[in-house]
Image: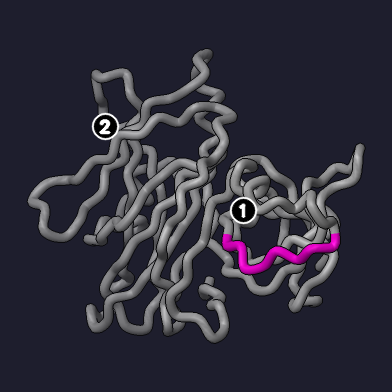
Amino acid sequence: MEFKQFTHMKKIVFSVLALTLLVACNPHDDENQVLSDFMSIATVDNPTQTSGFYFKLDNNDKMWITSTYFPYYSPKTGQRIIANYSILSVNNDGATYNHKVQLNDFYEVLTKGIFNITPATQDSIGNDQISIDDIWIGSDYLNVEFTYPGYNKIHYINLVADTAKKYTDNKTHLEFRHNANSDYATYSKWGIVSFKLKSLQANTTADSVNLVIHSKEFGTPTDKTYNLTYKFGQLGNSNVKKMLFPTNNEKIQ
């Protein structure tokens, strides 16, 4: 899947918005006021696959697209995107959304589940080196921003559960895997992926899971690990993140 790039933009700032941020902008002062250039990571809600769809921020705010610069873009429900949007109005009483918005631009995020590895699939999954720039949980997704060396081949990214490996710390161990597909290490490329975590809720009666994410990274002789807690139903935060978007067509699956 090729990344879809923001036009006329190389470096942008996007916010995983909390409701407090929207209130701080005082949209209630004028329902016709246009608040522009919000950048948020979100999940598409579009069961009928139309261009006038909803997307939900990680803080659970639901945005309804009533105006768009991409009338033929109709993603499937569950697709993760980074949306550049303007708030056109607040919701009416009883509405199923929080804001009407205009979609100015979008960036489609690779969205995958957890892959249960077997001896037969071990080689195809690969375990090539990569660099994790940021890793965080938002809503029910593990989000990973990363860089990797490549040239012109498709690279494969997966979050792997390997039941053949045993751990005694009562934590869920997962592996962030990269298959470079024998590509030439010519350029530094950038990517972002969201992994669905909801399947982990079926394996416990608790309200959270302690995760250990293993990755094979440059400059480290052994696996690097990241400890995170996946709290079921936890909403995203209002941290502002700066991200460098690629200027060429990265290919990852």
Q: Magenta segment range?
A: 32-39
- Across and down, in percent, residue 199 comes to 55, 33
Circle 2 Cα neighbour tier, 10 Å, few/some/many (<14 / 14–19 / ≥20):
few
Which residue in the structure is indicated by mark 2? 165
**How far is the residue under mark 1 from the one under mark 2?**
33 Å
| In magenta segment, residue 34 | yes
Reply above or below: 133 against 7.
Answer: above
Q: Main secondary structure of the magenta part?
A: strand
Answer with the quarter of the image where residue 96 lies. Answer: top right
Answer with the quarter of the image where residue 189 lies. Answer: bottom left
| In magenta segment, residue 207 | no
The residue that appears at 50% across and 81% down in the rendered structure is 9
- Across and down, in percent, residue 28 comes to 79, 49
Q: Is residue 181 visible?
A: yes
Could you tell me which secondary element the residue under label 1 belongs to?
A: strand
Q: Nearer the viewer, residue 39 or 74?
A: 39
Between disc 1 and disc 2, whose residue precedes?
1
Which residue in the structure is indicated by mark 1? 42
